[in-house]
Structure formats: C-alpha cells, structure tokens
C-alpha cells in the first residue's frame, strides 16, 4: 500500500530513492470516484519508473476545475483510495491550480499524463523540459470519466 505524505516528506522519500538509484514517475489528478480509467492510468504510469508519486487535487481545486457539486469524496478519502492501489508508492495532496510547484520541487524523471493529452499539450511541459525530465502519455483511451459515471448514477430529470 502506498503512503500519503506531506510535501516535505515526499521530497525526503524521493531524495532517498534517487540516492538508491531508483527512478521516479509522477502522475496527478482529482481521482473523484475512482474508476477503471484511473487504475489503468496509474498502472501505466508505474511502468515508467521504479517509484510512482501521485498528486491528488485538494477539494477547493477540484471545485474550481469540476464545478460546485464536486468533489464527491473529500481529498483525504480520495488520497486513501489512490494509495491503496498496488501501483502507487506515494500520494501527496496539493492545493495549487497546477502541479508545477511539485514538479519543480520533486523533479521526477517522468511526468505521466493521460491520453487526453499529447506531449505538446501537457500544461507543465516547459517545466519538465527545463529540469531535464521526460513526459509520457499513458493509460488507455479516455473513454471513462467520473462525469459520465455520475450521470449514470443520477440521471437528469
């Protein structure tokens, strides 16, 4: 089971992993109502390196990104669910609108994004390139979404 860590503690772990010769991958998202698309994305991200860090958006940033009815689950619950996945080593909750500050601090070898991106559309691409990291587009086609799942659970009307 992965560990939920503070920003400071995850930085210490990453430093120790690097000192031991391990590579580090980084993935991020809201992970509101965990579904098979999330699992496939994180499993594919894990295959990119020896360790996988997953950054989970805090509740306020999810509301900003997804609307006032989200998140369905609070950040602590979402982080615990993500940490329970076998592919995940470390989970950190972040409040910023993007993961750029975490990328700058942790400098993962690989920044993994889902298939709804291309290498050229990843918002943090310049940050990753600046420190010499690589971007990987991973996971299955984006045909799973929490929004669709929620609409099937509680259809309009």
Image (cartoon, rainbow, N blue to C red):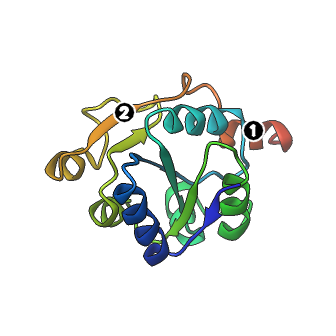
Q: CA distance from mark 2 to mark 1?
A: 26 Å
Residue 133 x/y as whole percent: 25, 45
Residue visible at 65% across and 67% down in the picture: 75
17 in relation to 125, above or below: below
* Residue 70 seen by the camera: no
Q: Nearer the viewer, mark 2 or mark 1?
A: 2
Residue visible at 21% across and 53% down in the picture: 127
Residue 43 x/y as whole percent: 59, 35
Mark 2 is surrounded, within 10 Å at the Cα level, by few (under 14), some (14 to 19) or many (20 or more) other residues, namely many
Can you tell which mark lies on residue 136?
Answer: 2
Mark 1 is surrounded, within 10 Å at the Cα level, by few (under 14), some (14 to 19) or many (20 or more) other residues, namely few
The mark tally for this picture is: 2
* 71 relative to 7 in the view: left or right: right
The residue tagged with tag 1: helix, strand or loop? helix
Q: Quadrant of residue 77?
A: bottom right
138 in relation to 149, above or below: above
- Give the mark, 2 or 1, whose residue is nearer the N terminus: 2
* 14 relative to 146 in the view: left or right: left
Residue visible at 37% across and 33% down in the picture: 136
Which residue was labeled with disc 1? 149
* Viewport quadrant of the C terminus: top right
* 118 relative to 146 in the view: left or right: left
Residue that protrudes farthest toward the front in the picture:
20
18 in relation to 138, above or below: below
Can you tell which mark lies on residue 5?
Answer: none
* Viewport quadrant of the N terminus: bottom right
The residue tagged with tag 2: helix, strand or loop? strand
């Amino acid at each position: 089971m992965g560990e939920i860590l503070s920003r400071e503690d995850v930085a210490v772990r990453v430093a120790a992993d690097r000192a031991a010769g391990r590579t580090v991958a980084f993935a991020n998202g809201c992970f509101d109502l965990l579904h098979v698309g999330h699992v496939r994305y994180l499993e594919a991200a894990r295959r990119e390196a020896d360790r996988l860090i997953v950054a989970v958006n805090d509740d306020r940033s999810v509301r900003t990104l997804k609307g006032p009815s989200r998140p369905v689950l609070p950040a602590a619950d979402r982080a615990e669910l993500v940490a329970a996945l076998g592919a995940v080593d470390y989970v950190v909750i972040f409040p910023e609108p993007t993961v750029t500050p975490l990328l700058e601090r942790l400098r993962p070898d690989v920044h993994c994004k889902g298939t709804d991106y291309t290498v050229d559309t990843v918002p943090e691409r310049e940050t990753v390139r600046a420190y010499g990291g690589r971007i990987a587009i991973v996971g299955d086609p984006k045909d799973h979404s929490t929004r669709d799942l929620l609409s099937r659970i509680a259809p309009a009307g």
